[in-house]
Image (spheres, rainbow, N blue to C red):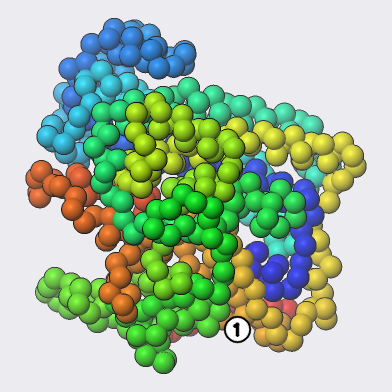
Amino acid sequence: MRAVENALGIQIPDNARLIRNIIEAAQYVQDHVIHFYHLHALDWVDIVSALDADPADTAALAQSISDWPKSSADYFQTVKDRLSAFVASGQLGLFANGYWGHPAYALPPEANLMAVAHYLEALDWQKEIIKIHALLGGKNPHLQTYLVGGMAVPVNPNEQSAINAHTIARLKSWARMGLDFVAKVYIPDLLAVASFYKDWAGLGGGVGNYLAYGDFPQVGDDPNTFFLPRGVIFNKELSPPKPLDEQAIKEYVAHSWYAYTEGDQVAKHPSEGETQPNYTGPQPPYDFLNTDGKYSWLKSPRYQDAPMEVGPLARMLVAYASGHARVQEVVNMVLDTLGVGPEALFSTLGRVAARGVETLVLAEQLENWIDELAANMGRGDWAVFNGDMWEKKNWPDEAYGWGSTEAPRGALGHWVHIKNGMIANYQAIVPSTWNASPRDANGQRGPYEAALIDTPVADPEQPIEILRTVHSFDPCMACAVHVVDGRGREVTRIKIV
């Protein structure tokens, strides 16, 4: 969408900017909370140990770190009884397949019980906060109201089916509910859990280079106004970030199951990218991968020929180093609470903490964008779509466009080549392609591979330590892999009329 807008020179109305910001911020808040509780917390929380907890002591712990109302001894006794029923049945349900009792777990039973209770609460909470997407986007995921040139959701205070005063009130209610849970449950839990795992502030550092496209424009689509700034950090330096040069992004396929026409040792800018499958992996009976050759369906994106980490840690480091006042305030609070220095940010624990910092900062900001939208409506500005460039007669014969955003998992870029009114080439680099990339033609490891070096593993049959670091990136391998038909058959064709 932004790639096409960039190629055709389309400027979106201010209301479209705000609606996009609101939708994206709501996605961050929901997605990061889901990641912490439902995708990552059980790497640190021993569910079965919670059965040994004293509910009264658990209540005292919870009340010492937050004034969240659900923190009585009776409440935690109910959660413990529910968990006991799971275990007694022999079917742990949500909590099956864990490495319970693993020696790498460090939380006391009461902290484990508190985390289990909030795990269950977060299941209900996330269904409510994401109603913002249902209202503004029609559904979640894969929202239906995004258009090149703006948004398809109407703004009109006089129409029941449009964004009106009632809509604004509902959006503000959900935003406040979201912030309440983040501030009173997620952040206190994050700090409580992290305090028992401070050794992980020295593990999982990875490549030490960080890239953020930045996002949440404050004026138009001007990168200089992004609420989360754009920039590049090399070698773990917290000096002002380097400016981003989009032309410095290139992809290798030396260790990927793709082929380039000019040979597999070259690097290509995405605007000239190719996606030609070249599978050379294990054949039946499926022996081990040969990592000296091709071993991944992911390409190897590089910036100035260096591997880069993307995601919440990259965004918060760039924001911190750029002087973002609120990010600096929250990051410093986290470091002070845990009693660690800035070097702890460059680690597995730093990745987990950065996600929480970002969630709080965006949950606080969300209502401000809703208020801006309401103010525009009050001034009679209802525009959500710019259709001036949709007349094909106004299109150039050939155009190239680059569009970027920051998905919850990290930097997401799209490149499009439009020729004679049709898409001639389209390429995307998604966050997990950056983070999970295989080695490039120069032998440089991607962030996942580099972050796992020197990780201690107590039990190779239950490598929970490996999971902790990989999960800290929030992988999405399905997003990162190019979808191809191995026989080269056309799957579908879209015609512009």
Secondary structure of the residue carrying tag 1 is strand
Q: Quadrant of the N terminus?
A: bottom right
Which residue is found at the position 32% from the left and 21% from the top? 114
Which residue is found at the position 46% from the left and 81% from the top? 268
| Image quadrant in which you'd find residue 323 | top right
> Residue 481 at what x, y percent from top left?
39, 67
| Image quadrant in which you'd find residue 12 | bottom right
Name the foreground residue: 36 vs 231: 231
> Residue 428 at what x, y percent from top left?
51, 69
Q: How many numbered marks, from 0 up? A: 1
Residue 173 seen in render? yes
Name the foreground residue: 390 vs 138: 390
Q: Quadrant of the C terminus?
A: bottom right
> Residue 87 at what x, y percent from top left?
18, 26
Kind of residue sitting beneath label 1: Ala
Answer above or below: position of 491 versus 197.
Answer: below
Q: Which residue is mark 1?
A: 424
Direction front: furthest residue: 239
Answer above or below: position of 394 versus 187.
Answer: below
Residue 86 seen in render? no
Which residue is found at the position 26% from the left and 78% from the top? 294
**Label 1: few (<14), some (14–19) or many (≥20) C-alpha neighbours in 10 Å:** few
Task: Report the side of 296 relative to 229 (left or right).
Answer: left
Answer above or below: position of 135 versus 196.
Answer: below
Which residue is found at the position 13% from the left and 47% from the top? 457
> Residue 490 at what x, y percent from top left?
48, 82
Direction right: furthest residue: 380
